[in-house]
Amino acid sequence: MSLFEDDHYQWRETFFVFFDERSRPSPSQFQKFLAELGSNYEVREVRTDDDGRFESATVLAPGDFAAMDITYVGGDEVTEQIEQMSEDLGNATLNAGQVEKLRKITRCNARFDIYHFEQMAEEEDEADMMDPGGLLIVLERLAKLCDGVGLDPQSGQLM
């Protein structure tokens, strides 16, 4: 079940990891990657497509009062987004590292969407307890796993 359907969680933001389809991790590689994150994370519902390739997973980070739905996307939707993003970011002032990441993204044809959710507080004194640190760790490690580039679309920051 997606966290969008769970009343205990509220969507906050979406991050992306762009990569080449040939670097798409297998379900076992993905589960190993998630296990390496440690006991602060709970993996639920790793799903595969009809060909047995990784499709999506739900990751809970209870200590951060957060969770993530991670979903694979490929095809025209991704290439069209990359074209538009390259235009937009190409007009911005980028440092050398960001320019290299932008070049790398233009060679990508797949992405992971990381939907970040906040666990809703049951008591008023627990409000605003969400820590985005877990999201950033997952984003960084996932980009490394598939030799990709992370993006915060809200800020346009390449990660």
Image (spheres, grey):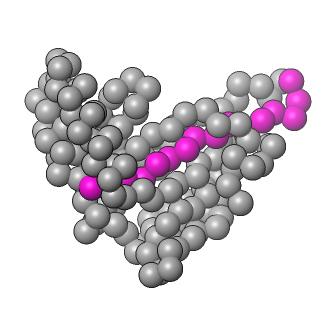
Where is residue 26? Give x, y as percent.
Answer: 40, 74
Q: Is residue 28 above or below residue 120?
A: below
Residue 5 visible (yes or no): yes
Where is residue 19? Give x, y as percent.
Answer: 28, 55
Q: Residue 129 or 159: which is nearer the viewer?
A: 159
Residue drawn at (14%, 33%) of the image = 99
Residue drawn at (28%, 48%) of the image = 79
Q: Which residues are magenta?
A: 109-124
Looking at this view, name the residue that lies furthest to the right: 123
Q: Residue 40 or 33: which is nearer the viewer?
A: 33
Q: In the picture provided, is 91 more to the left or to the right than 11?
A: left
Q: In the picture provided, is 88 more to the left or to the right than 24?
A: left
Q: Is residue 114 magenta?
A: yes
Where is residue 44? Give x, y as percent.
Answer: 65, 64
Residue drawn at (46%, 48%) of the image = 113
Q: Is residue 104 above or below residue 75?
A: above
Residue drawn at (61%, 32%) of the image = 12
Looking at this view, name the residue that lies furthest to the bottom: 51
Q: Is residue 130 magenta?
A: no
Q: Split into 4 quadrants, where in the image is the C terminus?
A: top left
Snapshot quadrant of residue 81 = top left
Q: Split into 4 quadrants, where in the image is the N terminus?
A: bottom right
Snapshot quadrant of residue 118 = top right
Q: Is residue 129 above or below residue 2?
A: above
Instruction: Name the dominant secondary structure of the magenta segment.
Output: strand
